[in-house]
Image: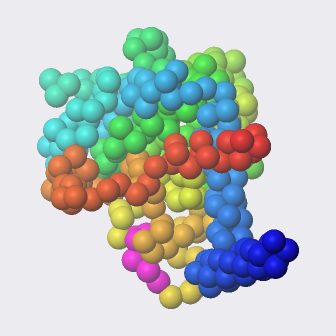
Amino acid sequence: MRPISVTFTIGLIFGYLSLRLLLTSMFPIELVSDSVKNEKNQLDAYNIHTEANQKTSSAENPPNSARILCWIMTGPRNLESRTKHVKQTWGKHCHHILYMSSVKTDFPTVELNVSEGRENLYWKTIRALQYIHQHHQDQANWFLKADDDTFVVIENLQYILSKLDPEKPLYLGRRFKPFISQGYMSGGAGYVLSKEALRRFVEGFQTGQCTHFSTIEDMALGKCMETMKVEPVDTRDVKGRQTFHAFPLDHYVIRQLPRPRPWHMIYDYYEPNEGPNCCSDFIVSFHYIYAVQQYVLEYFTYHLRPYGYSYRFRPDEIVEANNKTNKGG
C-alpha cells in the first residue's frame, strides 16, 4: 500500500506543478497584477459610481429617474439656422425645454431683459436662472444649460444624474481649471445644476455674495458656485474617459503623436486623453454642432446598431464588483 500512496502523492504534485506552469504561460502573473492595479486606479478616479452605489441601489434610483429641465441659450438670429434643429432632435428628449432669448417669439422663446451680444452672455445666464427658479423650479430636479450649437444625449446624462442627490449643491460638466481654484464647467459643453445649486445661485445674487464681475459666462458662474459652496462633480466614467465635450468628436478621437497639450485641451482640469480612448461610451455632449450634424448625431445615437454586437461597456457591473472587493466579498 505504501508504494501506491507514494506514487499517488508524486502524481498529484506533478499535476499541480504542470497546471501552474500552463496557467502562468497563458496569463503572466505580472500582466494580471498590472490589470488589477489599473482597473482599481480607474475606479478610484470616478467617485460618482463608487460612492453613490454604496448608498443606494439601482432599484432605488433607476437611470431614468432624473427629471431634467433643459434651457437653451439662443437669440433671434439663430432660431432658423441653429435652434430649430435642436428642437427637432435632442431637445425632444428633455422633460422640459426653454429657449432663452432677448425677445419673445412664437418659436417659442422666453424674453429676458438683456441685450444680445457676447458681452451680455453672463447677464443672460443670470436672468435665465432667476426666471427658471421663479417659474419652473418644481418641474425638474436638474437644470441643464446648453448653447444652440450643442448636442446632448439626455439618456446618458440621466444615467450620471441617477447616481446623485439633487437636494445637494452639485454642479456638473466639462471641468476647466484656470482662474477658479475648484475649477469651473465649460459653457459650450453644457453644464448642469442640481435643484439646490440653482437655489444657491439665485440666493447668491439676492444677498450680494455673487456679482456680475466678468463677461466670461462659464468662468463667472463657476466663481459663484465656489462662493456658494456648490461642489463640482467629476463626470468622467469608470475608465477615466470624458463625457462632456467642448468641441466636436474629431478634436479628440484621432490618435496623435506625443506633443504638448493642444490648444483645445489646454484648460482641461484632468489630464486629457487623445485617440479612441478619449471619450466615454456614454457621451453626454459635443459643442460646435450645427444643423445637419445635429441630425447625423441623432441618427448615430438612436438608430445605428451593429447587428449581433454585444455591448462591452457595463459600468454598473464593474462598480458592483469593485464594491464587493472593497467589502471583502
In this orientation, which residue lies closer to the viewer: 312 or 244? Answer: 312
Does the image show residue 147? no
Residue at point 68%, 78% (across, down): 15
Residue at point 55%, 40% (across, down): 172
Residue at point 20%, 41% (across, down): 89
In this orientation, which residue lies closer to the viewer: 155 or 293? Answer: 155
Does the image show residue 32? yes
Residue 213 quadrant: top right
Q: Residue 252 colored magenta?
A: yes
Q: Is residue 67 left or right of residue 21?
A: left
Looking at the image, what colour scheme do you see? rainbow
**In the image, residue 131 above or below residue 1:** above
x and y percentages locating residue 280 in the rendered image: 45, 57
x and y percentages locating residue 48 in the rendered image: 61, 40
Q: Residue 249 colored magenta?
A: no
Q: Is residue 137 left or right of residue 270?
A: left
The quadrant of the image that shows the N terminus is bottom right
x and y percentages locating residue 313 in the rendered image: 44, 54
**In the image, residue 306 above or below residue 24:** above
Residue, far right: 2
Which residues lie in the magenta part? Answer: 251-256
**In the image, residue 41 above or below residue 138:** below
